Image (tube, rainbow, N blue to C red):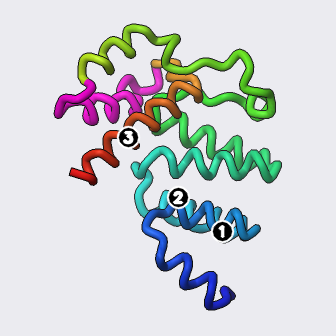
Amino acid sequence: SLDEDTTVTVEELSSIAEQVDLFLLLGRHEVAISMLLSRIEVNEECDPRIWFKLLDIYHVRGDRASFEKLAKDIRVRFNVALPSWEDSTLQAEGRHGLEHFPHLLDKISDYWGTSSSLGYLQSLMKDNRSGERSGFNEDAFREVMFLIGILEQAKDVE
């Protein structure tokens, strides 16, 4: 059970990411995992950041079986080639993001600032070739999610 201070603090938070981060900070990993799993169960097409947050938690906790199962589920739903458990334990050296996809960077630049930019970035997140694409590496995929977040925040401010 939660104490009153924790409950009030969580109720004041607006996003699931903030709530999950708070529970992780409080050492309540099972609550954070439960929240993320619940969100995924309700909507499997939810924001990929929810899936990746859960993947990160599994990795930090050393839960390889859950990590690998979730990684397979992510690969089925999104346009990303996830690293293996072993790859995830390596330092970020040698990993690369969108800079290794110059044709996409050009298109993103062309769309940026237009009403089509968010839709284009969101289309990059989905596997629209029935698993025939190798998918983005994790760094590039996370960068696309970051750009989507920027556009969504800007849209909320307007």
How far across and down, in percent of the image, does residue 125 sit? 41, 33
Q: Give the alpha-carbon distance from disc 3 to disc 1, as whole Å.
A: 24 Å
At label 3, the amino acid type is: Ile
Q: Kindly identify which residue carries mark 2.
A: 17
- Asked if the residue under mark 1 is in contact with the one under mark 3, i.e. CB atoms within 8 Å, the reply is no
> Relative to 158, is 149 on the left or the right?
right
**Which residue has dot 1 on it?**
23
Coordinates of residue 71 in the picture (x, y in percent): 63, 39
Assess disc 1: are there few (<14), some (14-19) or many (≥20) residues with their C-alpha within 10 Å of its C-alpha: some
Q: Nearer the viewer, residue 91 or 64?
A: 91
Q: Earlier in the sequence, mark 2 or mark 1?
A: 2
Query: Is 152 situated left or right of 1 in this image?
Result: left
Q: Position of residue 6 (x, y in %)?
A: 63, 81
- Looking at the rendered structure, the secondary structure element under dot 1 is helix
**Relative vertical location of residue 73 with respect to residue 100 in this rendering, above or below:** below
Q: Residues within 10 Å of mark 2 (few under 14, many from 20)?
A: some
The answer to which image quadrant residue 52 occupies is top right
Q: Position of residue 45 (x, y in %)?
A: 40, 49
Residue most extreme to the front: 157
Left or right of 12, for residue 120: left
| Residue at mark 3 to residue at mark 2: CA–CA distance | 15 Å
Q: Nearer the viewer, mark 3 or mark 2?
A: 3
State which tag comes first along the sequence, 3 or 1. Answer: 1
The CA span between labels 2 and 1 is: 10 Å
Q: Residue at x 65, y 46 (%)?
A: 55
What's the mark number on residue 150? 3
Q: Secondary structure at mark 3?
A: helix
Relative vertical location of residue 63 with respect to residue 86 in this rendering, above or below: below
146 or 86, which lies in front? Answer: 146
> Which span is picked out in magenta?
112-132
In the rendered image, residue 128 lying in the magenta stretch gets the answer: yes
Q: Is residue 138 above or below residue 52?
A: above
